[in-house]
Image (cartoon, grey):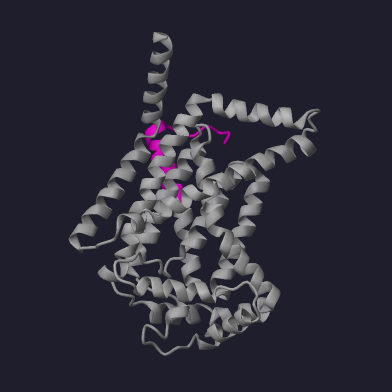
Amino acid sequence: MHSAVSRTGFVVRDLLRRHFLLAALVAIYTAVAAWLSQRYGLSVETDKAGVLVMHFLTKVPQMIFFVLFWRLLYHSYVVRAPDRMAALKQDVRGFLSDREGLVGGAIATLLMAVSLMAFAQLKSLIPIIQPFAWDAQLAELDRLLHFGTDPYVVLHAIFGGPYSLSFFSGMYNVWLFVVYFALFGACFMRSGSVPRMQFLIAFLLVWAVGGNLLATVFSSAGPPYFAQLGLRDTFAPLMGMLEAHAATGALSVVETQRLLWDFYSAPNSINAISAFPSMHVASSVLMALFGFHISRWLGIALTAFATSIMIGSVLLGWHYAIDGYAGALIAVAGWWVARWLVQLRWGPFPKAP
């Protein structure tokens, strides 16, 4: 009995040591969020501050279902196990009996949940610290980079059909679930996995630097809100096309865009609007980089997903194209900075992933 307790204590201490760098970064992130919230007098109710965490937790049962369903398909059609249900039960027993994996996953999940709350707090400060002021410049830069044409005009000429718009709306709708799935999966990977820790640290850096710091410096709302910002509404044709699509009853983003503005305008609410950089694109590119460390086919699938998010972000009016380009660069930079930090603490990476 004493030996078992000692062994458990050793495992926990070892896992805490492995997660020390991530925990330190989360602590700094949380401290900055708390300090700035106090300095600017941000008043957000506790239940609203934890909305991202609660949303994440409500998706856990769905994630578990998809993992079990995938393993069932794997045993049925890949390895062709004689008793696929017995093989599935063995997978579940193996997972539940892995104390190190469960404790390591719980530690990582807690740390990432805290970081999500810090992100939400800091995002709510964006219009307080720096009211939306860069939309006109970003729209002009978009035209400059695309030879005097708004990128949405080109994309609508190619993907402007009702089925295409519904497809990209669907991709946008599942984006958050895919992000949660990747994050949850990474948390419960083998705790000694270098790509796992690289992804978790990169995830934190990308959202802190891109979603908070740069989003505040270059505070912008995006094409749907040009008119509300008092600017010459050059995006009225785009919004008109999207509203015409929504009027058919097809899958649309127009109502969500309106709700986000109403939500932003309400007192003591969490701001969910920010154009530059696109965190949809940044997180999708980051997942693709991580996916290639797991399997080539997963990396290709996530690259296709990131591409659809990049196209959809402009096609559906959520972002300027420059937002997506910046998001992709931030993801790559965060991935390599995280690699450097992990190497700095644990030494050179092994040649095999």
Q: Residue 74: image x %, image y %? A: 73, 38
Most foreground residue, 280 or 286: 280
Question: Left of 332 or right of it: where is 20?
Answer: left
Q: Is residue 322 magenta?
A: no
Name the quarter where the N terminus is drawn.
top left
Residue at figure coordinates x 30%, y 74% from the top left:
131
Q: Is residue 252 depicted above or below 50 in this figure? A: below
Tally of numbered tags: 0
Residue 97 image position (x, y, % from top left): 55, 24
Q: Residue at x 36, y 46 (%)?
A: 114
Name the chief secondary structure element in magenta.
Answer: helix
Residue 338 forms part of the magenta stretch: yes
User: Could you say which is closer to the camera, residue 227 or residue 199?
Assistant: 227
Q: Residue furthest left?
A: 39
Which residue is pictured at 42% across the width and 32% down the height? 347
Residue sitting at x 35%, y 34%: 20
> What range of the chain is rendered magenta?
335-353
- Rendered location of residue 304, percent (x, y): 64, 58
